[in-house]
């Protein structure tokens, strides 16, 4: 099916000004379309620029929660219409209204303007301000019509990528490409960790971060293909941005990825799941006990 092009929209947000973020997001989407993108990926919680609240201020948490939106609000429906107009999929991130505390969500809008999948961040950073969020309850994969053929797409948000189980479950559910909205500093260790997710699961991965000075940029993509047909190691890096704003195109050759997944040994080829029962245990032992951890 040839190349699938994912545009990493590395931007700084306009604070929690949703109208300004909508306008800026649309401008970057249109630029991505001109560059041939099939899918665009926003950084985490774009509608309010990954902002939270100052607990020392009166009613701050209630004001922040009131900024959460649903899939039927104008911010989301605007991008649904834009996806249909541009015939391009848009992975849109936002603070989603929920029963109780809101969720940190991404909706993958297909090129027909319909939501193919909505997923909420499972591993919320409960040691920090994200304790104010409701964690997601599962990982999802959908078939995305790119116009060139269908691709199996999954998603994991920011801290989710730091747990190998997230990408592993997505692979087991059939993901070929994983989209990762991000909102934290990306250095060598986190980037190496992200590369490992691609390698161990034989999936392509694409991550969009906020540009400097909001974060440090370095939006990045890695290929699923680590070795060629003759066993020679391949550079898995597709693209790594600098710190500034921009649209960065990551090209994934789905034919090569699928051939690689057919012949190689990682992913689910030689796993021994009957030996992994401890992975689902709810018990936590020293030194990992944390009073604020939610299971």
Image (spheres, rainbow, N blue to C red):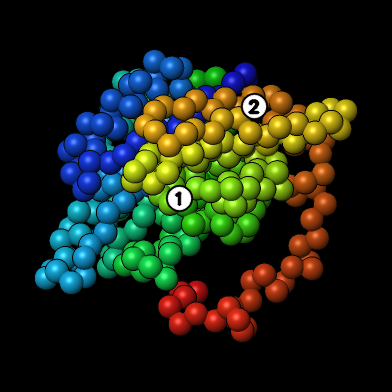
Q: Quadrant of the rendered structure where residue 13 is?
A: top left
Secondary structure, mark 1, is loop
For disc 2, the neighbor class at 10 Å (few under 14, some 14 to 19, many from 20) is: many
Horizontal placement of 267 versus 27: left or right?
A: right
Which residue appears at 34% of the width and 26% of the height? 29
Figure quadrant of the N terminus: top right
* Residue position marked by numbered label 1 in the rendering: 185
Q: Residue 115: horizontal and vertical position, in percent?
A: 38, 38
Cβ–Cβ below 8 Å for labels 1 and 2? no
In the depicted view, which residue is nearer to us: 131 or 186?
186
Can residue 140 be spotted in the picture?
A: no
Which residue appears at 19% of the width and 36% of the height? 20
Q: Quadrant of the rendered structure where residue 7 is?
A: top left
Could you give the CA–CA distance between mark 1 and mark 2, rounded to whole angstroms? 30 Å
Q: Quadrant of the rendered structure where residue 8 is?
A: top left
Which residue appears at 62% of the width and 18% of the height? 2
Q: Is residue 129 above or below residue 228?
A: below
Q: Which mark is residue 254?
A: 2
Which residue appears at 39% of the width and 28% of the height? 246
Horizontal placement of 247 versus 14: left or right?
A: right
Q: Residue 108: horizontal and vertical position, in percent?
A: 42, 39
Q: Residue 247: horizontal and vertical position, in percent?
A: 41, 27
Q: Is residue 205 above or below residue 95?
A: above
Horizontal placement of 125 versus 213: left or right?
A: right
Q: Is residue 280 above or below residue 137?
A: below
In the depicted view, which residue is nearer to us: 157 or 138?
157
In the depicted view, which residue is nearer to us: 263 or 35?
35
């Amino acid at each position: 099916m040839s190349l699938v092009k994912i545009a990493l929209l590395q931007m700084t947000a306009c604070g929690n000004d949703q109208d300004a973020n909508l306008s800026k997001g649309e401008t970057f989407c249109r630029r991505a379309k001109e560059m041939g993108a099939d899918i665009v990926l926003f950084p985490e919680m774009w509608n309010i620029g990954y902002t939270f609240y100052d607990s020392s201020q009166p009613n701050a948490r209630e004001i922040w929660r009131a900024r959460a939106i649903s899939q039927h609000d104008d911010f989301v429906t605007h991008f649904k219409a834009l996806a249909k107009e541009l015939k391009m999929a848009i992975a849109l991130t936002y603070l989603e209204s929920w029963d109780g505390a809101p969720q940190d969500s991404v909706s993958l809008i297909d090129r027909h303007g319909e939501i193919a999948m909505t997923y909420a961040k499972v591993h919320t950073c409960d040691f920090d301000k994200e304790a104010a969020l409701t964690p997601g309850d599962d990982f999802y994969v959908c078939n995305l019509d790119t116009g060139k053929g269908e691709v199996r797409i999954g998603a994991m948000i920011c801290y989710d990528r730091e747990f190998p189980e997230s990408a592993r479950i997505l692979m087991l559910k059939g993901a070929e490409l994983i989209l990762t909205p991000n909102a934290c500093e990306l250095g060598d260790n986190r980037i190496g960790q992200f590369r490992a997710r691609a390698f161990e699961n034989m999936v392509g991965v694409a991550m969009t971060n906020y540009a400097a000075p909001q974060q440090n940029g370095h939006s990045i993509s890695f290929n699923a293909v680590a070795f060629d047909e003759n066993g020679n190691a391949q550079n898995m890096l597709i693209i790594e941005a600098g710190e500034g704003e921009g649209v960065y195109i990551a090209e994934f050759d789905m034919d090569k990825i699928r051939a690689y997944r057919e012949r190689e040994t990682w992913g689910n080829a030689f796993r021994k799941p009957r030996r992994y029962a401890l992975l689902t245990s709810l018990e936590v032992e020293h030194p990992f006990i944390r009073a604020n951890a939610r299971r």
